[in-house]
Image: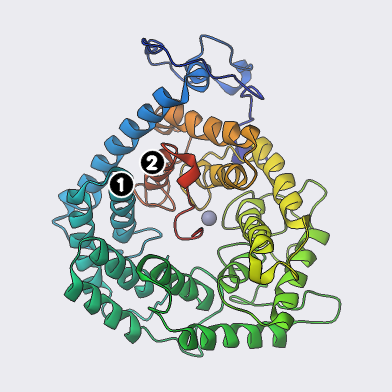
């Protein structure tokens, strides 16, 4: 199945040069080499030059690339569309541009980007006014949550109140699923995003608790003898991954104050996945498909599941829960997944959901958690691969630009976001999934 990913021929490690007055000279652009002729790049190769650059210089390269991409994305999703919104979502639509601008504001402090973010959110608000979708990534929850948080940083209290009131109007019904992209756990994430940025209790615990109660009730009802303590279904399939399955739902639940028996069920569900993973360290897409070891994506497979394990490992260290989440198995499973992602995760796509950008975040997250430089090297290597080659490979038709080519989750928006996060990797967070 090598047609899904590029064989990773990047060196296992490249030392960074010491910063000097003169940065390494820029290399002339290189045409992509046919797969058959590829060998491990060596010194003199533009990619190896990037990897050996002092981080202070490389960080500036990432910043320039991110800001250039941002201009292109804003122009193509907003400037040239007459500022009309066809797809309002953060996942594949215009709200993704607003979220990218919000991240640019966080990194650079440039208020122009914050104000443009708010302008785009306003258009997404109008475009989504009758939508019944509720989540951060795929629904009105994201529009109202980002609106409220951006308004807070813009010191616009009445706008913040407006979006918070709108958020309260977002209604979950019994028809909604529990998964992350369209269901309850993705709505919980929107609540957590608001509470993190605006303050604990902005979305009251009682409201969050009611949603978590429903998820736990549904998960226990679907559980079967010999399976995990919690199980869920989306369109007839019992998925495992971050987008539609167990990993995403456990991820949303871990931000909620759970009772000891609920913690035990969440842990038991995560352990079930570790115990039943493929020998490669990858994970099945669903209970119905326990045979094909193919997908290494955030949506399906090891990357999204590893980010959930890293969160569980962090929950281990939280004072209030240390007695019950006190083991290292989750971190070890995430590190096994990182090994697999290094070998099979250099996907022929750019975005967050099923692309190189999203997969890089497992390394960044492990680096933040462990401080191990091997992980930052690997995250940097994926980001440098994109920096050096993505445009050429996309133009040559060797890499897919995505179904929504400028979007955050399927297109170059994800690459722009990763480049921004590479400026200071200790502050990186997978957009819409990692909070702390
Ligand atoms: Zn995907």
155 shown above or below 109: below
Of residues 331 and 42, the one nearer the viewer is 331
Q: Position of residue 19 (x, y in %)?
A: 44, 16
Label 2 belongs to which residue? 420
Q: Is residue 398 visible in the rendered structure shown here?
A: no
How many C-alpha atoms fall within 10 Å of the one at disc 1: few (<14), some, or many (≥20)? many
Q: Position of residue 411 (x, y in %)?
A: 40, 47
Which of the 4 image quarters holds residue 308? bottom right
**Residue 207 in the figure: left or right of residue 36:** left
Callout 2 touching callout 1 (CB < 8 Å): yes
Label 1 belongs to which residue? 104
Q: Earlier in the sequence, mark 2 or mark 1?
A: 1
Q: Position of residue 124 (x, y in %)?
A: 25, 67
Q: Secondary structure at mark 1?
A: helix
- Label of residue 343 in the image: none
Which of the 4 image quarters holds residue 215? bottom right
The N terminus lies in which quarter of the figure?
top right
Q: Secondary structure at mark 2?
A: helix
How many C-alpha atoms fall within 10 Å of the one at disc 2: few (<14), some, or many (≥20)? many
C-alpha distance separating marks 2 and 1: 7 Å
Number of marks in the image?
2
Q: Position of residue 375 (x, y in %)?
A: 62, 37
């Amino acid at each position: 199945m090598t047609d899904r990913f590029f064989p990773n021929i990047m060196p296992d490690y490249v030392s960074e040069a010491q910063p000097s007055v003169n940065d390494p000279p820029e290399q002339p652009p290189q045409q992509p080499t046919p797969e058959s002729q590829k060998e491990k790049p060596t010194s003199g190769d533009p990619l190896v030059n990037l990897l050996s650059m002092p981080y202070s210089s490389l960080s500036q390269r990432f910043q320039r690339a991110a800001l250039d991409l941002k201009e292109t994305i804003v122009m193509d999703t907003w400037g040239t569309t007459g500022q009309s919104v066809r797809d309002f979502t953060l996942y594949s639509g215009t709200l993704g541009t607003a979220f990218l601008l919000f991240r640019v504001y966080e990194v650079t402090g440039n208020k122009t980007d914050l104000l443009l973010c708010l302008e785009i959110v306003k258009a997404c608000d109008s475009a989504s006014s009758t939508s019944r979708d509720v989540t951060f990534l795929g629904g009105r929850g994201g529009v109202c949550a980002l609106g409220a948080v951006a308004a807070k940083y813009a010191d616009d209290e009445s706008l913040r109140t407006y979006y918070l009131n709108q958020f309260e109007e977002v209604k979950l019904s019994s028809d909604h699923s529990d998964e992350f992209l369209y269901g309850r756990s993705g709505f919980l994430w929107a609540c957590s995003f608001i509470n993190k940025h605006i303050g604990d209790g902005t979305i009251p615990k009682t409201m969050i608790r009611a949603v978590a109660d429903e998820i736990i009730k549904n998960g226990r009802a679907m559980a079967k003898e010999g399976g995990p303590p919690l199980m869920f279904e989306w369109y007839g399939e019992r998925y495992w991954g971050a987008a539609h399955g167990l990993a995403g739902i456990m991820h949303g639940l871990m931000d909620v104050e759970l009772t000891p028996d609920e913690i035990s069920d969440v842990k038991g569900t995560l352990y079930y996945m570790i115990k039943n993973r493929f020998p490669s360290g990858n994970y099945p897409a669903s209970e119905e498909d326990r045979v094909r070891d193919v997908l290494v994506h955030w949506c399906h497979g090891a990357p999204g599941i590893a980010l959930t394990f890293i969160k569980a490992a962090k929950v281990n260290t939280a004072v209030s829960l240390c007695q019950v989440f006190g083991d290292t198995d989750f971190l070890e499973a995430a590190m096994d997944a990182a090994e697999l992602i290094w070998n099979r995760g250099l996907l022929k796509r750019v975005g967050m959901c099923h692309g190189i950008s999203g997969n890089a975040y497992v390394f960044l997250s492990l680096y933040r958690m462990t401080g191990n430089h091997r992980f930052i090297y690997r995250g940097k290597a994926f980001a440098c691969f994109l920096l050096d080659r993505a445009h050429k490979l996309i133009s040559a038709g060797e890499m897919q630009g995505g179904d929504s080519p400028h979007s955050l989750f399927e297109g170059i928006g994800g690459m722009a976001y990763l480049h921004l996060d590479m400026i200071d990797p200790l502050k990186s967070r997978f957009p819409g999934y990692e909070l702390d």
